[in-house]
Amino acid sequence: MSEAKREFDPAAHLDAIAPALGLTITAEQRPGVIRFLATAEAMARIVQAVPVGEDTLELAPVFRPGQPGQERTA
């Protein structure tokens, strides 16, 4: 079964995610945040459109601060 792809709604996204992140967006901030979310979604579509084969992905090493060879204790 195929799910129909819905168009991104930055205002609805903001309304859903801001409370989950504990953010308070003022009425003055809201238009700018909505513009940013729309821009970020457009950039994500560009990145997602690039075909990347599974055999071309290389995982980056994990950064662990400190001296090489030293074990970190939790």
Image: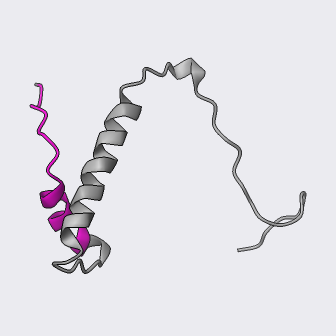
- Expressed as whole percent of the image width and height from the top left, the position of residue 32 reads 25, 65
Q: Does 56 sit left or right of 63 as displayed? A: left
What are the residue bounds of the magenta stretch?
A: 2-19
Residue 26: quarter of image: bottom left
Q: Does 6 sit left or right of 37 as displayed? A: left
Q: Residue at x 63, y 31 (%)?
A: 58
- The answer to if 5 sits in the magenta stretch is yes
- The answer to if 43 sits in the magenta stretch is no
Task: Please tell me which residue lies in front, 51 or 37.
Answer: 37
- Expressed as whole percent of the image width and height from the top left, the position of residue 47 reads 41, 33
Q: Residue at x 15, y 67 (%)?
A: 15
Residue 73: quarter of image: bottom right
Q: Does 32 sit left or right of 69 as displayed? A: left
Task: Please tell me which residue lies in front, 9 or 72.
Answer: 9
Residue 1 drawn above or below residue 70: above
Task: Please tell me which residue lies in front, 62 or 1.
Answer: 62
Q: How is the image coloured?
A: one colour
- Expressed as whole percent of the image width and height from the top left, the position of residue 65 reads 77, 65
Residue 21 drawn above or below residue 41: below
Residue 29: quarter of image: bottom left
Q: Does 31 sit left or right of 36 as displayed? A: left
Of the 4 image quadrants, the one containing the N terminus is top left
Disc tally is 0
Of the 4 image quadrants, the one containing the C terminus is bottom right
Q: Residue at x 43, y 20 (%)?
A: 51
- Expressed as whole percent of the image width and height from the top left, the position of residue 72 reads 79, 69
